[in-house]
């Protein structure tokens, strides 16, 4: 339960070795910075260029003058970074992603071909291959009360050991505009989240989540 392979095709990132030996997918979050620095020896050979200390860009990726991007970070090949994007560091962003206008990314692992296009916040999260979040979607990473983020299962709570952790979003999952993922949310592959939904807990793969909280399996 909660193993990385339940949520992600690990072949869809050049840097998925970060998941080696990990029991729960969220356990990679404290490892992102060290993983970036350890990748240095192979990044140049792989066609990446270091444009600032520990900030690596893949071929075909350009940082526009209106964006703010800080290391340590690896941003893959042919990533579209748009006006006003704010990448705060400790981020691994896969090939062919879109980081859109006024989007903020912090301490997150983003697989290939993910779309984060408009006014989004993604903090302390993992987003799977070809997942997509609509305009205004927020991945909230801190509880309003003190203590570690807990993952709520059917009959128990799992202490993640993390004060900051928002969401695991599986491959091919879609979230509609202005959805909020609450801290400790786990969403399986190929889910659909309706707009204006507050999501929490564990959502099984291929589930449709409506904005009244009702859920149904995709046909």
Image: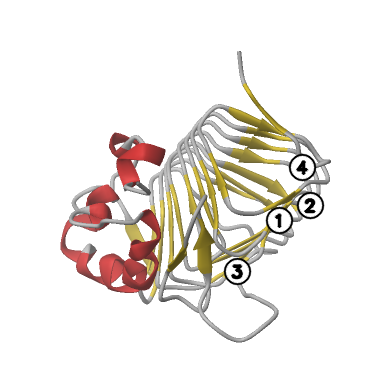
In the visual, does 176 lie left or right of 208?
right
Q: Are marks 2 and 1 in contact (CB under 8 Å)?
A: yes
Residue 116: x and y, percent? 63, 47
In front here: 38 or 193? 193
Which sits earlier in the primary sequence, circle 2 or circle 1? 1
Residue 124 seen anywhere in this rendered image of the structure = no
Quarter where residue 65 is shown: bottom right
Quote the CA–CA distance across marks 2 and 4. 19 Å
Q: Position of residue 125 (x, y in %)?
A: 51, 59
- Rounded to the nearest whole Å, what is the CA distance between mark 3 and mark 4? 20 Å
* Residue 136 numbered tag: 2
Check residue 213 in the rendering and tell me which mark sits there, or answer none: 4
Vertical arrangement, residue 190 with respect to residue 1, above or below: above
Q: Earlier in the sequence, mark 2 or mark 4?
A: 2
Residue nearest the viewer, comparing 123 with 90: 123
Q: Which residue is mark 3?
A: 141
**Earlier residue among tags 4 and 1:** 1
- Specify few, some or many for label 4: CA neighbours under 10 Å numbering under 14, 14-19, or 20 or more: few
Residue 59: image location, x then y, percent: 39, 45
**Disc marking residue 120:** 1
Q: Is residue 3 left or right of residue 157?
A: left
């Amino acid at each position: 339960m909660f193993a990385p392979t339940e949520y992600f095709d690990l072949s869809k990132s050049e840097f998925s070795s970060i998941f080696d030996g990990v029991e729960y997918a969220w356990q990679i979050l404290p490892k992102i910075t060290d993983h970036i620095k350890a990748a240095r020896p192979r990044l140049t050979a792989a066609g990446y260029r270091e444009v600032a200390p520990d900030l690596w860009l893949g071929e075909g990726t350009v940082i526009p003058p209106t964006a703010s991007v800080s290391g340590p970070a690896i941003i893959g090949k042919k990533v579209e970074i748009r006006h006003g994007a704010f990448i705060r560091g400790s981020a691994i962003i896969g090939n062919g992603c879109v980081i859109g206008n006024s989007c903020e990314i912090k301490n997150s692992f983003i697989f290939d071909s993910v779309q984060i296009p408009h006014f989004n916040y993604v903090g302390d999260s993992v987003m799977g291959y070809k997942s997509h979040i609509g305009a205004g979607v927020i991945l909230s990473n801190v509880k309003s009360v003190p203590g570690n983020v807990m993952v709520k299962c059917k009959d128990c709570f799992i202490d993640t050991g993390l004060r900051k952790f928002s969401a695991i979003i599986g491959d091919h999952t879609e979230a509609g505009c202005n959805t909020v993922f609450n801290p400790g949310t786990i969403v399986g592959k190929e889910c659909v989240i309706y707009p204006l939904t507050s999501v929490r807990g564990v959502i099984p793969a291929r589930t449709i989540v409506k904005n009244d909280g009702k859920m149904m399996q995709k046909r």
